[in-house]
Amino acid sequence: MFQGIVDDAAAICGALLAELRVRRDLLGENGVELDLAALGGTLAANKARREQTAKRLRDLAERTALPESEDKSLRLARVGSDVAETLEIGSKLAPIELWCADVPLLLEGERAGALRLWMDREPRRSLLRALRGLGHEAAAQLGQERERLRALRDLTAARQHQTMLAAAAARLRRETETADVMRAVGEELRKLGFESALLLSEPRGLVIAHLSQRPAASKALELLGFKKLSDLRAFPVDPARSPLLASLVSSPEPVIDVQAGPLLRALLGRRASRDTREKLIDALGAHDVLALPLRGAADTALGILIAWPQPGEEPDLGALSAFSLQASLALERARMREKVREQAQIIERAVEERTRALRDANERLREADRRKDNFLANVSHELRSPLVTILGYTDLLLGERLGPISDRQRQCLQVARGSGRRLRAFIEELLDFSRFELTREAMTLQPFSIKEAVSQAVAGFAPRFLERRISVRHRVARNAPPVLGDRERVLQVLTNLIANAERHLRDGGRIVVSAEPKPGFLLVSVQDNGTGIAPEHLDKIFDRLYQVGDVKANKAARDAGLGLGLNIVKSIVEAHGGEVSVQSTLGKGSTFSFTLPRADVKNLPETTPPPVPPRV
């Protein structure tokens, strides 16, 4: 554009040289001095001649040989021969008359540049009018260039602010603590060209929570008589008592222009005199103050962000408004995290207290349970000793070893012996239960043959089976894999299940004991064709002290136990990591099954039992 102006001017006026000088700020530089922008005419026909002519003009300017003028009107002057010789116009033998016309270029009444034309003759009046027109046209083009540069500068600044806002938003999203958020707010605002102070809304009122200028903040605190900012937070301000603060907190405007003096008076009250407030304003450089209300969800007041531009910085209110929204979101997130953390700590403390109370109560229950088991064991043992004596003397009397007895006496003694045997069964069941409960944690798991255990368990019932004509079948293969468990406890499981089956069989019934290998475990079943169990009892059959009501009507009720045998079975099997189950059809019989881990499966422990399930 500049080159076009001087080329047009040289062509219209027939000038030997057209020189355009404009203010530096219109050239994208700092300053308002006039600087050479373009050369045109015959003395600047090409690049080499332009550079040579520009150098000669600088030499003339240094020697102050060129006419200088700050006039706002056209000025015409004749130039000395030494200037013509320097510019190599004419010669000593053929000197020419050299004229210089300075055309001021005005923007809004101010001198923005000058168009200087060098001519080899005095210009006529018509040419002077043309020069004035050229000046107006050139000034208009300079105005357009100024607006273009201003728009470009604003666009560049806007892009920089957008980049800084994006970076500030990313940083604020990363911060989780309120102190870190406040520090980030101050540092990011400084990048945007603002110093700041942050007022936070607390239950006690507004408090000055952060200042961005560390050296200036230290001086400000010293003026107030404080050593650190946390001391100042001990003096909150109730916005309801200050019309200025109340209006700022409740204002819907994103950016509010406030006066520093009244704002400090509202915040500091009588703690700072007018002279001290003025010193504070000078120390912080907070002469042009902007207030930005910070709001959270449901329009709740979070505080006020006070900002003032750094020296030489032009405030961008749009960027400041966008940043205040980001600061509000970051502060609200940090406060919500703090509330969640506080609630989590309260819940954690409550859970710990309840857990401790439950642990203590559980320990007390375990201790009471241990005492109960010891009591049962002791009582059962103390009852069994005299009972053995009673049964022994009853057998002697029935055998008439102490003398003959009558039929009525025999009948009474047989009833007494039956009741004694039933009581002995109760006591044996209680002893088995208490013995397992007291020693369940001392089980020793070792591989053993399930076939041998089944044979031993069945052999114990041989006299009883022979008396009642009950047939027993073994379905355990000789090559059945060994199981991993406590052999004595597993033998007790088999004994309890076989005894339960025998108790519910009619004379001449059948019992089948089988073992079937499965992946990782062995499935052992005890099947009978006895009375069976009603469906409503199956879910509770393994509960402690539970007895099926239908059994009591059976003639075998005299041999029924206390309802502990099946519960012992379940406890022992689960202590081995297995499961128990029952299938039954009323009137056709029942099948009780349980699983045991196989010893031939790799990576199984040999001496450590699986975790014992908690007792209920």
Image: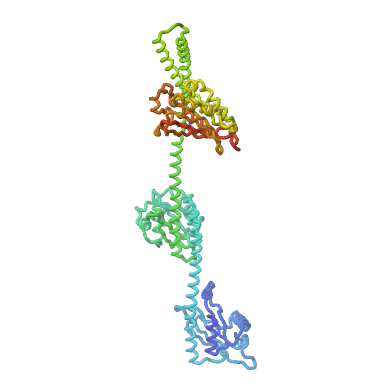
Q: How many marks?
A: 0
Camera-nearest residue between 5 and 404 = 404
Which quadrant of the structure image shows residue 41?
A: bottom right
Q: Between 472 and 301, which is closer to the camera in this rendering?
A: 472
Q: Residue 509, relative to residue 415: is it above or below?
A: below
Q: Is residue 56 visible?
A: no
Q: Where residue 356 sits: x, y (%)?
A: 46, 34
Of all residues, the one furthest to the bottom in this rendering is 94
Quarter holding residue 560:
top left
Q: Nearer the viewer, residue 366 or 79?
A: 366
Looking at the rendered image, the quarter that the C terminus falls into is top left
As drawn, the residue found furthest toward the top would be: 403
- Residue 286 x/y as whole percent: 45, 60
- Visible residue check, residue 609: yes
Q: Toward the viewer: 505 or 158?
A: 505
Residue that sits furthest to the right in the current view: 93
Vertical comparison of 434 with 9: above or below: above
Q: Position of residue 359 (x, y in %)?
A: 46, 33
Is residue 442 rendered to the left or right of residue 566? Answer: right
State the image coordinates of residue 271 (x, y, percent, origin top left).
41, 51
